[in-house]
Image (tube, rainbow, N blue to C red):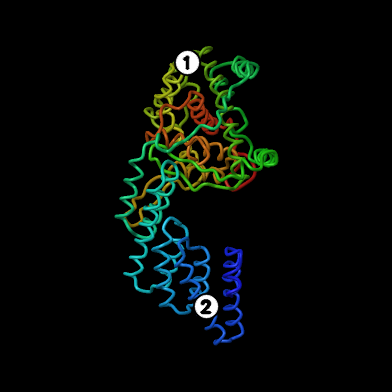
Amino acid sequence: MPTLLHGEDLTRGRLRAVESLARAVALAVEMNQRDLRDRAVEQIISLTGDLLDLSAAPFGLIYRLLEVLHVRRLEPDVVRNLIERACTECGDNLQLHLAFLHMLRVMTPEPIAQKDINRRTVMAMIDHAKQNTGMLRLLDLNDAATAARDLGMPDLLRDVTLMIQSMGTAELGLVTTRVVTLQLSQDEVDLAHAEIDGAADLAEALRRVVGTWPPAGNLDFARRAATEMIRTAPLRFGIAQGAVNPVGPVPVAAASSDALANAQAEFQLCCLQRRGLAVAAMLDRIGERFCPSEQDLEAAIAHDVVGSASKTRMLLHAFLYYWAGNDDAAVHLALPRVEDLLREIERGRDVPVVGFAKGAAPGGVTQLGTLIAQMPAAGFDGSWSRSFALLLTDGEHGLNLRNDVGHGLCDCPPRHHVALVLHAALFLLAVAHGVVALQAPGGDKPN
């Protein structure tokens, strides 16, 4: 051991010494050689103390040594003292600090003492976050808030929440790395216009807007496209990707390093955006050609599934506001109608759309996220369900319009996004009118 610790290459020597002692303890325990085990334990304790005395203590090696004793419950009092010292001195290394605190918590059976260690854990995370700025600080505070919530410390959770809320979007240091402008070619615009020009009347023109292809594309095709995207740019899609709601600001979900999921989401979102541009061109053409009145629209789309006369008027006004250029009014009127249409279609196809009271939680109707998840059970193709999710409720990869618009988290969406919401309503109306056939619930044949 002295040869390893006092050779020319100190770093390598210390590493070999630590691993040799860890192996010695393991062999002694395996062979039931208590005397040899105790000698190795003594050397581990001595070496740990010596390493802690260094001006630049190697806390990774110290953790490895203490872990050898900790997992076997050897010399708990001495180990506890060394862990406490390591916690005090490891300072800026948050991960090791948390690892040492976790060791202490495992060694502590008393609930009150465990609660104190939990508080120390969260405070260490908060202190570390305060040393950072911008996005790093937000992510560290988000981790601290999650820990405070999970460990049952509402006072610290509130403190961290207020710290996060005090951060402005400008403080995050976000930088635009690339801007992709999506637009249709003139040939594509002409094709969209021609589709409407070929309709015999307003009802047929609205049906032509629906089309037969889900706006975000077919799932199987998207997976194949994503696989090819990964092949051509493997590093890009292997990098963990997440989303931040800047209004909080708060991370929407943990960053995902699932390359296939990231690539597929990007491909489908691109398809959705391009389809939105085409739908906007078609709707604009309908406005130019037919100049629909409220009565014209009602004759074209009226159906019992829309609901009361008031609900019908709200849907009609959504289209009329769109054609008048009032996109903000159109999207606010259309979004609730899309949810209501989907709920009533699922109700009519024997899919549960109500929830029952449980304890303090009241009963109620199923909300949009669950309704979209249930679409396949009602006979919708999974590709349509995914398109609806990307458009309305997916905050990690999609446009998330229902939540962002409904909760006041964004400005008025772009016109082609509003067009996609109207397209969703038209699609559900086409289902209600029997123009689009669904599979039988639980079956394979359209009905």
Q: Nearer the viewer, residue 391 or 296?
A: 391
In which quadrant will I find the C terminus?
A: top right
Please say if 308 is above or below 293.
Answer: below
The percent coordinates of residue 92 (x first, y second) are: 43, 55
State the image quarter where residue 216 is shown: top right
Q: Is residue 193 left or right of residue 353?
A: right
| Residue at image point 43% right, 77% down | 76
| Residue at image point 42% right, 41% down | 134
The percent coordinates of residue 223 (x first, y second) are: 66, 41
Q: Is residue 27 left or right of residue 330?
A: right
| Residue at image point 39% right, 48% down | 131
The percent coordinates of residue 244 (x first, y second) are: 45, 40
Please say if 21 is above or below 234.
Answer: below
Q: Is residue 135 left or right of residue 236?
A: left
Check disc 1 and report the residue beneath it: 292
Check disc 2 and report the residue beneath it: 43
- Mark 1 residue type: Pro
The percent coordinates of residue 225 (x first, y second) are: 67, 38
- Mark 2 residue element: helix
Q: Nearer the viewer, residue 154 or 142?
A: 142
In which quadrant will I find the N terminus?
A: bottom right
Please say if 85 is above or below 196.
Answer: below
Tell me the distance, in whole angstroms, between the alpha carbons under discs 2 and 1: 88 Å
State the image quarter where residue 250 is shown: top left
